[in-house]
Image (tube, grey):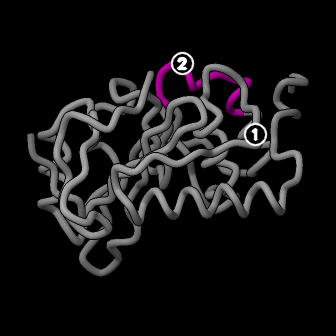
Amino acid sequence: MQVQSLAGAFANPPIDAAHAFRSAMNAMAKPGQVFALKGATPPAPMSIAGGCLLLTLCDADTPVFLGGDLDSQVIRDWITFHTSAPVVPAEQAMFALGTWDDLAPVTQFAIGSSEYPDRSATLIVETDAISQDGATLRGPGIRDTARLSLPETRAFQQNAALFPLGLDFYFTSGTQVTALPRTTKVSL
């Protein structure tokens, strides 16, 4: 295990984790709004926001899938050391981290079942930038409409049609996070 894997967690775990949890929940409750997540320094190329989400939401009972360049030994060791979360194949993941292309096709992830819709995956999509333009969002937590640049619209429309099943999404860039729960309707 490299030294890089041992460093970079929250400096003040109780306080930093509480702030990160609140930002993560606010992002999911208010789709399209952008929140700050900071306090961790995960190994590159993982964003600070992506690292904070993993530190806050994952533990030994939450299997994680890593896509693309994020599937490195340093990042695997960092996740294992700080959260004890196992790194697993996509179809077994409760959380997945990667770029949109790394996570494609998103249909490979669990969408829950009619008895247990909560047994679906949450995808953390690393982006170059988060922009509040592009697709129009409607649904719970949105006053009228919100706007968010998305990598595509069709996958999110199909996902919303599965409700109460489906995937939930976080989008991260640097220290920024926003979310798109399965209840959100997406249009151009």
Q: Which stretch is magenta?
A: 67-76
Quickly name the residue at label 2: 69
Quickly name the residue at label 1: 40
The spot of residue 40 in percent (x, y) is 75, 39
The quarter of the displayed image where residue 61 is located: bottom right
Residue lying at 57% horizontally and 57% vertically, measured from the top left: 23
Between the residue at mark 1 and the residue at mark 2, the CA separation in whole angstroms equals 19 Å
In this rendered view, identify the residue nearer to me: 165 or 27.
27
Q: Is residue 2 left or right of residue 181?
A: right
Q: Is residue 61 left or right of residue 157?
A: right
Crowd around label 1: few <14 · some 14–19 · many ≥20 (10 Å):
many
Sequence-first tag of 1 and 2 = 1
The spot of residue 172 in percent (x, y) is 49, 37
Crowd around label 2: few <14 · some 14–19 · many ≥20 (10 Å):
few
User: Among all residues in the image, which is located at the extreme left?
Assistant: 188
Q: Amino acid at mark 1?
A: Ala
